[in-house]
Image (cartoon, rainbow, N blue to C red):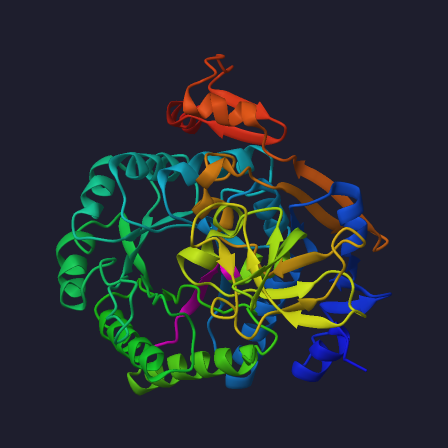
Amino acid sequence: MKSSYTNLIEQTFEFPTLEFNVQNDQLQFNNVPLMDIIKQYGTPLKITYLPKIGEHITNAKQFFKNAFKRHNYKGSYTYCYCTKSSHFSFILEEALKHNIHIETSSAYDIPILKNLYKKGKISKSTYIICNGYKLPQYQQQIVELLNEGFNVMPVLDNLREIDYYLENATVPESVNLAIRIATDEEPNFAFYTSRLGVRYSDINSLYKDKIEPNPRFKLKMLHFFINTGMKDTAYYWSELTRFMFKYCELKKICPDLDSIDIGGGLPIQTSLQFNYDYQQMIDEIVENIQWICNKNNVPVPHIFTEFGSYTVGESGAVVYKVIDQKLQNDKEMWYMIDGSFITHLPDSWGMNQKYIMLAVNNWDNQYQKVNIGGLTCDSQDFYNTEAHSADLYLPIFELGEEDQYVGFFHTGAYQESLGGYGGIQHCLIPAAQHVLVDRDENGNIVTKLFANHQESQSMLQILGYDETENTNGVSHENGHYGIDLETIEELAHS
């Protein structure tokens, strides 16, 4: 007798039953019966499981708390959320329930922060770490927040940025500044972050020439980030060590300096073979920071992080229905889905991001190796063994006799911002509907439709075929929103 899909998964992987389990031939995600959600809302469907966000924030705080206790580390830890991972209101409002702070990347983050402040979701004491290369509008809005008494810390990304703050910040209290240090790239790394930040040789002169002579401005933090993330590699440790020696050197001439921001980079689970010891990695980071400070006879710094993907990535899932089976070239079995990877999971084709892929139902069926094809005519709209972390298998099913659904998991970070949420996608494949899943005070599952399937009218309007005027520059089509830049600027200054 041939094995079922259940046998395949159990024999091939260490199946993480705390997050995934199978009941009555059907997959559950965080104990949420996915087939119930599908029956209620249909597919293609994006799902956000909100409790996962708080779980990850709590875990990260505990990892640092444990490491501080183990090494008798005297500094404090501050968890910031990197908003560019997902700007949605339900993400930020859920994350802010867990006593976190904010890291921004552009001028258009600021209206979001003002909205959150009006709602009482953040206070003026909330840290706002302003990163990125800053155009004049971003600098202007940072100064407005400073002058209004918000706890803003601009992270200087070049030697000229500080000039605007020196000229325009009128707040009587001192203004705290940070400097981002430019790191070297990992050998053969294709994504260049060395363009960001101030080079090591300019750090001291930037402080001595422009910050120290101005008593209202204090250099409080050095910022460090490498795009490969927090990995146990020679590259990571060498860059962190170099950064910490610079911190110690600068601390000796800058008594106000007392904090470091080590960026983000905690990985999320992208396959069932995932093996990463979070506690051990953070223990080693804390131990290295403390060792270097002790060696240089300087106090250990307070530690900030800005976790984005780690905060929201594992909360997300995308579910499709298999709408056709095609045996191509007499050997390749294609399962065609009712959506598009280019529209709904742009990371999977644009950056070769891997995801956990599992059948949602028919787990007792036999299985076969497949390729999964999206709806567009683009050659990149597929997901197969090469795109995945292992061979791709799904249950065999009788088309027309039974339905087959497939889920991609841990998709909660970056997809909407990279794909252009509610806008124009390749072949005009519409954005999927989006459902929020939460639990009430008794632990019962509750769902809420955040957005319906995108409809043609919103596309016609964007493309200029529908000239219907929008009130205040905002259009709302079945849950999908579009807002013009002029309106955002007006909101920012209101």
The residue at the far front in this view is 330
Is residue 440 at least partly visible in the picture?
no
Q: Is residue 40 left or right of residue 121?
A: right
Give percent across and percent down for residue 447: 76, 44
**Span highlighted in magenta in the image:** 298-309
Is residue 368 at least partly visible in the picture?
yes
Give the residue at x 50% y 15%.
Answer: 470
Quarter-of-image position of residue 297 = bottom left
Please name whichever residue, 223 or 188, is drawn nearer the observer in this view of the structure.
188
Give percent across and percent down for residue 287: 44, 84
Give percent across and percent down for residue 319: 66, 53
Quick check: is 50 in the magenta stretch?
no
- Pick the quarter of the image with the N terminus: bottom right
Quick check: is 302 in the magenta stretch?
yes
Q: Is residue 419 left or right of residue 12?
A: left
Judge whether 392 appears above or below 150 on screen: below
- Pick the quarter of the image with the C terminus: top left
Please name whichever residue, 209 or 186, is drawn nearer the observer in this view of the structure.
186
Give the residue at x 22% y 74%.
Answer: 249
Please name whichever residue, 123 or 172, is drawn nearer the observer in this view of the structure.
123
Q: Is residue 7 left or right of residue 129?
A: right
Give percent across and percent down for residue 182: 24, 64
Give the residue at x 60% y 66%.
Answer: 370
